[in-house]
Image (cartoon, rainbow, N blue to C red):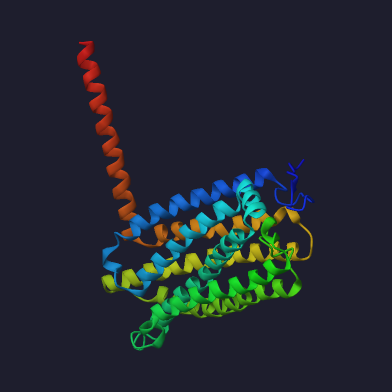
Amino acid sequence: MQNITVCRYVDGSEASDICLDLATDQISVWFSAVVLIANIIHMVFIMQLHHHKGTVFYTTLRLTTINDILTSVTNTLLMFCPFREYVVLTYPSVCLIATVLGVALFGFKYFVILFTIVERWLLLAKPFQYSESIFIRKYHIWVWFGLAFSLLANFLTYFMAFLYDPLFCYDTGFGIYGSPSYVNFAIILPYFLLNTAITIYSVLFFLQYLKLRRQQIRTEADVQLKQACMYVAISTAAYMGCSMVALVFQSINLAGKGQELKPWLLLINQTHGIWNILALYVALKSYRDKVKESLTKCLQCRCSKARHVIEPESELTN
């Protein structure tokens, strides 16, 4: 049986849809917190990949991780039912800003994934034109464009929802499901277009990646190229899997069914933050070495401290 928290709007009317399932909300919050901590540690290891520094690939690794960290922070707050209740009932405009930031970061991740796939595809398909391509030369401009577009598009979209109903993000779906149809369309259309572009370039990338796997490794540069492409392949496959499941959930929700699936939609989208870490660990040997080295040092440090504690006790006993 679901735990339903009955809350009241400013005018005194009841609203019982914010905390349909407290257990699900708590799972979402804890999972977001785990993703947050994991990605902070992940960033520490990425900063130690010195031979990748200065490359576009290294930039995309950092962008993906920073995005996952910020998304986890906003999701932890937005999925925390008491926080939503307090903010919406007291400061609806703050809820608007928090929602715009949360969804914009989620949208920006689509851009980062697309940029990552396009960069690897260019390197494999057009290696001699790679450095001179406008995408690589103006990469930072493309990144800023993706971020600006995500922020502006979501602000305008959710501002319309805010005018329609100032308490729109009282809903777990952050207004997506309680907004007018034109707002829903404005929210979904950019993601549909980005997903279409990601799908097209993913097919092109995987075709080139299969050719790469059949080639003989001759130099250390070939090894690093294969490992980096393997990471993108695993990460992209995980993203496509998460997106397919999320699309099913989104369709059910937009059809007016499966109200209890709303929190799980964000939870599924969050899982890519974990898959991304696992993909880099599996694919990149230098990353695995850094992780193993750090774990070894931690274990040695703990063993050393344990010996220091045991030795004085044994001396006192003697």
In the picture, which quadrant includes the N terminus? top right
Q: Is residue 211 visible?
A: no
Q: Nearer the viewer, residue 80 or 274?
A: 80
Q: Residue at x 64, y 70 (%)?
A: 159
Q: Is residue 45 left or right of residue 193?
A: left
* Count of marks, rendered view: 0
The answer to whether residue 136 is above or below residue 78 is below
The residue at the far top in this view is 318
Of residues 2 and 208, the one drawn nearer to the viewer in this rendering: 2
Q: Position of residue 26 (x, y in %)?
A: 61, 44
Q: Residue at x 34, y 56 (%)?
A: 45
- Residue in front for this viewpoint, 249 or 206: 249
* Residue 30 horizontal/vertical position (percent): 55, 46
Residue 53 visible to an observer of this rendering: yes
Quarter of the C terminus within the rendering = top left
- Please indicate whether residue 114 sits to the left or right of residue 219 in the image: right
Q: Is residue 180 left or right of residue 103?
A: right
Relative to residue 30, is residue 249 drawn left or right? right
Q: Which residue is nearer to you in this view: 73 or 240? A: 73
Q: Position of residue 209 (x, y in %)?
A: 45, 75
Residue 227 is situated, as x and y percent measured from the top left of the image, at: 37, 67
Q: Residue furthest front?
A: 11
